[in-house]
Amino acid sequence: MTVLRLAAAALASALAAGTLVLAPTAASASSDQVWTGGGDGTSWSDGQNWQSMSVPQNGDSVTIPAVNFPARTVVTGMPSGTQLQDLTLTDASLSGGDATVAGDFSWSVSQGFEILGSPLTVAGNASFSGAGERDSQAPMTFDGNTDIAGPGLLSIQDTGPAITNSGTLTLEPGAVVRASVCCVTPDEFINNGTVAVPASGTATVAFMGFHDQGSVSVGPGGLLDIGGGPGVFGAGAGLGGGGTLQFDQGAAITLAPHVSIAAGSTMLLTGNAQFLGAGSFTGGGKFSWTGGTIDGNLGVASTIHTTISGKATKTFTSPTSKPMALTLRGGTTLQGPGEVELSGATTLSNLGTLTMGPGTTVGASVCCVHPDHFSNGGTLIVAAGTKTATATNLAFSNSGTVKITGGTLFVNTLSYKQAAGATQLAGGALSAAQPIDIAGGTLSGFGTITGSVQNAGRVSPSTTGGVLKITGAYQQTKTGVLTSVLTGTSPGTKFGQLSVGGKATLDGTLKVSPGNGFNPHGKSFSVLLYKSRSGKFATLSGSPAYTVSYGPAAAKAVYP
């Protein structure tokens, strides 16, 4: 009796304190429900199809295995609003209303194909595996960790947001996620979390819209190939992991400003893919362009290295014929025979260091009333070896430094104009179809300029590398300056000499000065050679004083 009184007192005390926890009854407890197909063989609502002889309830874990494999297991009529703890499908199809899985979801297809026809939300982990095809015909939402593996295709056949990822979705090497149709009302892969590809593997998302508002991580040596369909890289989206994200097969990606490419990672535009919009790349990685179209403004940060290469034509265009610019602020390497073609009021603007290799071409599709532009405000290095780098059908302008170290820079059709900065021949040559306009800055060095030169700035032939030669005419305006430094009596190697193959029309200033302690007294120096001449230098500059003797083929600085 004492024990009973104590128990009753304890019960009353617990009830009063609100701390009494009652164990669930058998009817409310979750259970593991396993499909057997022993009833009609297809209906979710037929209790005889389940091992427990009862239909699964909300909160249960459901397993649908391969029954009578390799014959297909097809389960239909899952009720709308179904809430499961776990869901496992093995060589099985499932359709019906929407379902939410609080725990884990697994779908494995070993051969043939199976269908998921129910909208699915997975809060826990999800996995797709097997060599067979998995056809999703309803939206899938993943909030946890998702793994897509195996050689079997994950086929998406649902218009609109077919896959929405808010967790970490891993595409294992060889994984392919592909929609059946594209692109008027495309299926969509929406990433608000992280899409990951392990190192040294290739995964593919094809013929669906890839909308990234989160991050993409591709391991070193890995590749994520996005092909076909429209997509978006939103503000704040980024690429990391040290691998490559590739866009090809007609992918049309609208870029937002400040898309980040982390150090070691590469964003690759190739094939017939497109970058659209007013985007920009930041970070410390690489942008590679081997094919396709940039259709709109694109800015590349000074910390990004750009490689433009390959045999295919790369097109930069303005879709509305409004002025658009591709602005390169970092290091850029241009190589391979495939032309970079500008079209529709566009400007290729180099504000970093751009190196043009042998046989490279930057051109425009039309010329010449409203030309496209190649603008250099940084450093343009022409390292063409024994070959030619070409700018064709473009208005070429320089306000930075153009340094030709090998081969020839050929400016075809339109003019070469320098407003400021420097053009340096350092072992290479410059060729232009129209007169080279040095409106400001300096033209210096040694080698051959094929064409004519108008000088309103400064021309400074080399005193060490050789003679600076102009095959055509040379016109110097009243603001122009021709300089020569004297360190000896050998033209090109000891004093600067300009050799003009055509007519020299003179005005402006001649500046001649000795250097390295050289004494020019009693000597004369042919600082300018020409085929014919008109005019004279208006001003002589330099110390000690000298006079100029104008002969039929040369102008000589003469020291008493």
Image (spheres, rainbow, N blue to C red):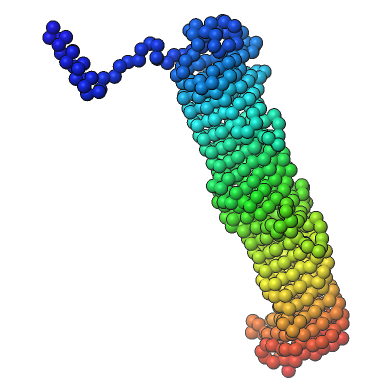
Given residues 296 and 311, the one toward you in this image is 296
Is 533 left or right of 168, judged from the image as shown?
right
Residue positioned 55% across, 25% down in the render: 120
Is 550 left or right of 143, judged from the image as shown?
right
Tell me residue 60's x, y (percent).
Answer: 46, 17
Q: In which quarter of the image is residue 176?
A: top right
Residue positioned 68% across, 74% down in the render: 441
Query: In the rendered view of the protein, which quadrant contains the C terminus?
Result: bottom right
Given residues 427 and 162, the one toward you in this image is 162
Residue positioned 57% across, 25% down in the render: 119
- Furthest residue toward bottom: 560
Given residues 492 and 533, the one toward you in this image is 533
Query: In the rendered view of the protein, which quadrant contains the N terminus?
Result: top left
Check the image and report above or below for 501 versus 401. Answer: below
- Furthest residue toward left: 2
Tell me residue 150's x, y (percent).
Answer: 61, 25
Check the image and report above or below for 326 versus 182. Answer: below
The reply to whether residue 426 is visible in this rendering is no
Tell me residue 166's x, y (percent).
Answer: 52, 35
Q: In which quarter of the image is residue 158?
A: top right
The reply to whether residue 122 is visible in this rendering is yes
Given residues 259 and 493, the one toward you in this image is 259
Is 24 left or right of 137, judged from the image as shown?
left
Check the image and report above or below for 232 versus 511. Answer: above
Q: What is the tally of numbered marks visible in this picture?
A: 0
Tell me residue 322's x, y (percent).
Answer: 71, 57
Residue positioned 47% across, 15% down in the render: 57
